[in-house]
Every structure is written in C-alpha cells, then in structure tokens.
Amino acid sequence: MTMNKLNSLVLFLVITCSSTLFAQQNKRIQFVEKYIEKARMDWQVPGLAVGIIKDGKIVMSKGFGTQEQGKSIPVDGNTLFAIASNTKAFISTALAILVEEGKIAWDDPVQKYLPYFQLYDDYVSQHSTIRDLLCHRVGLGTFSGDVIWYKSNYSVEETIKKAAKVQQAYEFRAGYGYTNLMFITAGEVIKAASGKTWDAYIREKIFRPLKMDRTETSTDQLLSKNNVATPHKPINGSNIPIAWANWDNMGAAGGIISSTNDMLKWIKLQLDEGGNIFSASSQQAFWTMHNSRKVSPNAKKVYTGRHFSGYGLGWGLADYAGKMIVSHGGGYDGMYSRVVLVPEEELGIVVLTNSMKGISTAVCNFIVDQYLGLPQKDWSKSFLKNEKKWNAERKTMLQNIALDRKANLPASLSTSKYTGTYECSMYGTIEVKADEDELELIFPDAPHLNAKLSHWQGDQFKIEWNETHAWFDFGIVAFIIDDHKKVEKIEFDVPNNDIFFHEINALKKD
C-alpha cells in the first residue's frame, strides 16, 4: 500500500469514527430532550432550562416550556433564573482567590475580619474559622435563623449580629446544619478582606473573565433585563406566578441570577480545575469533605453503591456508581435549581426551573445515568411519586389541624388586650394593632410579612397574610396568657420546612 493510500485510509477511518460518534451523541441528546419534556409535562412545570457539558464541549443548552404559565414566550439558554444556593460555590471560590492572593487563610478566625461576629457561645465565636463558615459545622441547625433575613429590611451586618441569638443545635464541629447565615457572614469576610462587596468582587474575578455577561446578583438588576423567567408557586394543582423576592440581605448565600449559557461557563471552569482563575489546590479544598453526613439505608438503595455523603466548601459531595459526584441544589421563592458534576467523566449539568417542584434532581440523575452507561431508570416517575405522597401528607396534616379546631372556644380577652409591642431578642419587634374589631399583625422591619388576624380558637388567631408567600401559607399566632390574665408573649405555628417562625419568641412590652 502506498503512503497516499494509507493516509487516505486513515483519514477515511477518522471521518467515519467522528461521524459515528456524532450520530451517537446526537441520538443521545434527542433521547434526553424527549425525556426532559415528558418529565416537565408530568411534573406540570411551566418552564426549565438544561445545560450539559462533556469533555469540554457544550452538548446542550436548551429551554423547555415557557417563561410564565399561560404565556407563549419560550425558555432558552439565555433565560434568567435564580440559582439560589448554587451561589455558595461562587463564595467559596472568591474566598479561595483571596487565599491565593495572601489576603486571608482558610483557618483564620472570622472575628479577625468581622470583630462583631458572635454566635451562641464565646468559645465558638472566637474559634469559628472561614473554613467553618463554608461547610455547615458551626453548631446551628439547618435553615435555623432564616426567618431573620427573609423579606426583612435588616442590613447584612444587622442580620449577622442577630445570628448571635440563634440557638445551638449540636456541638461545634460535631454535626451538620445547613446554614445560610454563615454564608451571609462569608460574604462580609470577602468585603473586609478585599475592600469590595462580595458581588462586586465576584463580578470582577469570575463573571467578567468568564464572560458571564447576563449573570446578575440582585433582583433590582432585572429591571433592565429581558428574557427573564417568572417564579411560580404550586397552589392546588396550579402554578401561580409570583413576584421576584429581593434577597439582597442574604445574597452571598443565594442571590445570583443566571442562565444555562452562563452557568456552563462556570461549570467548565470547575471541570478545568480553575483555569487561570484559581488553582487546582483550591479546587481540592472545595471537593474535600470537611463535614460528613450519614448515608441512610434508603439513600444506599436509591443511589447505587453509595458509601459516603458530605459537604466540602460550597459543594455537596457523594459517590454514585463508583464515581465522585459534586453537586448543589438551590431553592428560591418560586424557582429551584441544581448543578451536578462528575469530574472523572468531565461531565457537568445545570437545571434551572421556574417552579418549586423537585424535577431538577430527577433530570440530573437521568442525564448522569445516560453518560455513565447505566441501566435506564425513570427517575422522574419515582421522584414524582414521592413528591405527590409528600404533598398528600401535608394536605392531611393541615386538614387535621382544621378538624382539631375548637371554633366555639372564645377568646379569653377583649380585642384591645392583645394589642401592643412584642420584642424578640433574636428577631426584633412585632406589633399587634387593632383596626376596629380586627387585629393586624405588623412586622416593622419586614412589612411584606404583615397580615390580618382572624379568630381561630381560644387565644389563637389565624394569620391571613397580606401577600402570597412561596414557602408558607397557613399559620397561627398564639397569645400566651399569664395567671393575671395578661398577655405574656406570642408564639407562631407556620408549618413549613424553610422559614421557622417558631424560633420567634416575642415577649410583650409593658
């Protein structure tokens, strides 16, 4: 065979192999797209966007459904969604850059940069480090204290100072409690060390170099943007559009708004071990388990061969089918997101949705299985069944509360006796006012939470919120009466898994 014929044969084989691989890839993507759209319809999600990167190349950045329920504007790769807690990895990356610049160290005490930082115990306050902030091990319970910042006018510094009154849930560095308050604190460490707010620093060090041109850090910035998804709350089987909630005072824990096109640039950076933005050693710090969690028997059953689960710095860590999985979820008022990386396979996935339904994890799991060559499993069907079961249980729980109500049990005091100012050392001031014979619940520092109160039973009143809230709806406030027939304090029962009103212990001022 002549050299020319040999070269021609090699070229032919290369072209043939490339064409075959392209056809296989195209077939896989078409299959995945079909699955995603069916899942979207099954879950009744108005819209979502999905991005996939494999071996350094983007193989999907596509929208499904519409930006708002009942409207025709489609979602695409540039549509903006809240990524919520997927912001946390940006915070750990920003701090890693500061470490590499010699401006901070992972094990520096937080008080070195924020002298006012204080938690439930002086020793814990003095010894909590930057590393502790980023791996949920300071001793606070999951979501504990989020009621402080939620829809409040408190500044970032005021929010951090109020964390001093949040109760301890477990021993320092001896448990896991997912805490937004500590990532809010980490954002202020960035400001103290760099002289720039966390969002300005991230924009300079990450967004601009990566050309994440559509990514924002505040809902205020959406006013000048188009192609923005609308948040939705599931209510009685329907998706109800709700307003974007401003999260500026907790932005370092969940304030970034982005698209799949931009997020794929971020994911590529992670899979490239930091590129020219941060070092591989920093990424090793992110992806080293700093706080472990128990793997339940159910998790071992659901996720093939799972042996460990825990948290690094801004990332969740686990194993699946012999591979390390690096991931994080995000929950915002009316939107959920998920990012999943399989570093050994150079695979990255991002799912952004405009509804509060758990479809994103199911979609990510299905895509991972496709690329790992695992037996096909209908994650969407399985997870949807679980979600419907959970919703049914919640509905039954609320129905039982209503059935237990003793509506004929009268209030023990006249309307005016409940009025006054109530103070909680952790939360602040709450007021109860009377408008003729109707009581009003006033949150001076969080007016979006204001509500009317209607008699429920005895000295309990149902909270009739003035606005629709994403995480909760039904709620009761109980007036606790002392032996002298005077109101001593108020207590809240607002059933939900995210914003804990029961942490508010508000005593009546004389």
Image: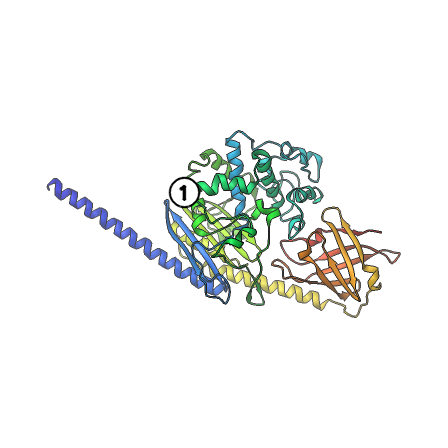
Depicted 287 relative to depicted 502: above or below = above
Relative to residue 501, is residue 6 drawn left or right?
left
Amino acid type of the residue tagged 1 in the rendering: Glu
Residue topped by disc 1: 344
- Residue 453 lies in quadrant: bottom right
| Foreground residue among 141 and 109 | 109
Looking at the image, residue 87 lies above or below residue 114: below
Between 178 and 184, the residue placed more toward the observer is 184
Say which residue appears at 83% left-offset and 62% top-offset.
416
- Asked which secondary structure carries label 1, the reply is helix
Residue 137: x percent and y percent? 61, 40
Q: Which residue is drawn at 66% across and 64% down?
A: 398
Residue at 59% x, 36% y is: 130
Query: Which residue is farthest left?
Result: 2
Q: Is residue 420 visible?
A: yes
Mark 1 residue crowding within 10 angstroms, few (<14) / some (14–19) / many (20+): few
Viewed as shown, does residue 12 lie left or right of 146? left
In percent of width and height, residue 225 lies at 49, 54
